[in-house]
Image (cartoon, helix red, strand yellow):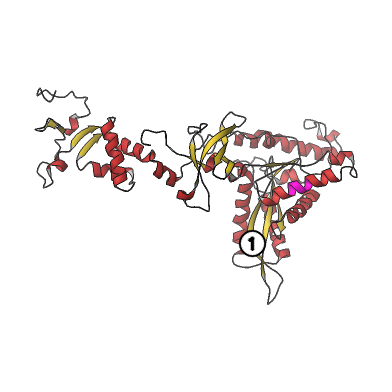
């Protein structure tokens, strides 16, 4: 059309550039810089189509020449001589598909947020029947009062109930398995024995699990049959995946929030610090589970403390007496009716708040078998992260893959997707 001196259609993408053909029949931008002192190539850059192979090679060359510059600088440099149609999208695509830039940025795959496990939605049970545990610290504590005291490191073992979000805090002196077992026995003596304990792959937790298993196997004859068969089930989340334990990580954050404001710069003794933690525990268990209503006639908000009051450590299952008349019940049955009323409110008020996904609402493309990836490591710079190849994936109950086995130079490791950075080696800009 330009060769025949015909006008471009009104819907053409080139009409705003006032295009013309130069002496070599190359299409250039007419533009508004004719009266400027710039060179001819700057005033009238050559028009390119972003889907053409030459344009893609030009962007890849410019990206490497500018030492892996970002999309903005890359596009600005190219526009000195060329004007690619749709160049901004092409610059972003070139930057995203560069293997070295992708490796250094460490962009991981983000699957959609998973469904809540069954252990968090079991009404009618007792608090801490299914428990998550984690450590917080270290915290500096004074060895004794007065002058000449030494500062020692202490830690906080945090137990969180899966259904009621109640918190139990235990102060421990170190991170060994023996100290964790002692904290676990203190927790069981005051809250009752849980059926399941979930934690990360810390050495303290794994060691305690091994010791308990050995104890049950070795003393099976001396223990009663009921006690030997009534052990605690330990569950461990994938390594380096704290988001799998978001419930107890939130408990760690809340505990630190109050502890920093109470302690400040002072150093308490072990007993004083333990007393402070018990008071913080009471505050955390008084938080409402559901948003507060503005109606003053509404009843007291449901808190984890409602489920902790009056719970025997060896309680038996009770009949459903929520709808019985209070006058016909004994005092013991009234307490049981109150407890069942709390669970009914938990089912109606709190569970509905767990329905929506607060983040990870859309899932990226999942990893495929044989994909080349980089495994993120906290103590190493990006260029020293280990290369690996995906050899197996493990889908969850909803069919979405969030954990994969990767073969590396040191063997096969299992990591969640928050530690896996896929490399675009199969892309067009590889």
Residue found at the far bottom of this picture: 147
Answer above or below: position of 30 versus 169.
above
The percent coordinates of residue 339 (x first, y second) are: 77, 39
Image: magenta residue range = 208-212
- 290 left or right of 80? right
The percent coordinates of residue 11 (x first, y second) are: 22, 24
Instruction: Give the SS element for disc 1.
Output: strand
Q: Looking at the image, which residue is at 21% across and 26% down?
A: 12
Q: Is residue 368 visible?
A: yes
Q: Looking at the image, which residue is at 72% across and 38% down?
A: 342
- 336 left or right of 200? right
For the N terminus, the quadrant is top left
The percent coordinates of residue 305 (x first, y second) are: 71, 46
Query: Is 12 in the magenta?
Result: no
Query: Is 210 in the magenta?
Result: yes
For the C terminus, the quadrant is top left
Q: Nearest the camera: 266 or 416? A: 416
Occupied quadrant, residue 401: top right
Occupied quadrant, residue 173: bottom right
User: How packed is label 1: few (under 14 Cα within 10 Å), some, or many (20 or more)?
Assistant: some
Q: Is residue 310 visible?
A: no
Q: Looking at the image, which residue is at 45% across and 39% down?
A: 423
Q: Which residue is mark 1?
A: 139
Answer above or below: position of 181 versus 408.
below
Task: Give the main secondary structure of the magenta stretch.
Answer: helix
């Amino acid at each position: 059309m330009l060769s025949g001196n015909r006008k471009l259609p009104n819907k053409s993408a080139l009409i705003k550039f006032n295009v013309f053909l130069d002496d070599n029949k190359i299409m250039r931008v007419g533009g508004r810089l004719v009266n400027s002192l710039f060179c001819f190539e700057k005033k009238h850059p050559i028009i390119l189509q972003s889907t053409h192979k030459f344009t893609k090679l030009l962007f890849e060359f410019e990206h490497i020449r500018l030492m892996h510059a970002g999309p903005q600088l890359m596009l600005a440099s190219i526009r000195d001589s060329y004007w690619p149609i749709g160049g901004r999208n092409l610059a972003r695509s070139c930057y995203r598909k560069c293997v070295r830039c992708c490796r250094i940025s460490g962009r991981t795959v983000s699957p959609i947020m998973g469904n809540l496990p069954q252990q968090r939605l079991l009404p009618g049970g007792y608090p801490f029947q299914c428990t998550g545990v984690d450590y917080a610290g270290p915290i500096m504590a004074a060895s004794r009062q007065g002058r000449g005291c030494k500062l020692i490191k202490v830690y906080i073992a945090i137990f969180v109930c899966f259904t009621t979000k109640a918190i139990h805090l235990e102060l421990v002196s170190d991170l060994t398995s023996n100290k964790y077992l002692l904290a676990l026995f203190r927790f069981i003596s005051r809250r009752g024995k849980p059926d399941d304990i979930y934690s990360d792959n810390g050495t303290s937790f794994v060691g305690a699990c091994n010791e308990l298993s050995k104890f049950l196997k070795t003393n099976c004859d001396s223990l009663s049959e009921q006690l030997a068969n009534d052990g605690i089930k330990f569950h461990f989340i994938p390594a380096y995946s704290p988001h799998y334990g978001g419930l107890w990580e939130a408990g760690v954050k809340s505990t630190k929030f109050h502890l920093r404001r109470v302690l400040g710069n002072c150093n308490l003794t072990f007993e004083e610090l333990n007393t402070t933690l018990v008071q913080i525990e009471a505050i955390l268990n008084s938080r409402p589970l559901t948003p507060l209503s503005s109606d003053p006639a509404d009843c007291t908000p449901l808190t984890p403390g409602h489920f902790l009051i009056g719970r025997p450590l060896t309680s038996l299952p009770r009949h459903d007496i929520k709808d019985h008349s209070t006058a016909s019940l004994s005092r013991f049955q009234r307490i049981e009716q109150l407890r069942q009323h709390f669970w009914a409110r938990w089912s109606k008020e709190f569970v509905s708040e767990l329905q929506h996904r607060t983040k990870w609402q859309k899932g990226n493309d999942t990893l495929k078998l044989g994909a080349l990836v980089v495994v993120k490591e906290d103590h190493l710079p990006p260029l020293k992260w280990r290369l690996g190849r995906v050899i197996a994936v493990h889908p969850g109950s909803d069919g979405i893959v969030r954990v994969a086995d990767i073969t590396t130079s040191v063997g096969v490791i299992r990591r969640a997707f928050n530690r896996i950075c896929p490399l675009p080696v199969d892309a067009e800009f590889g």
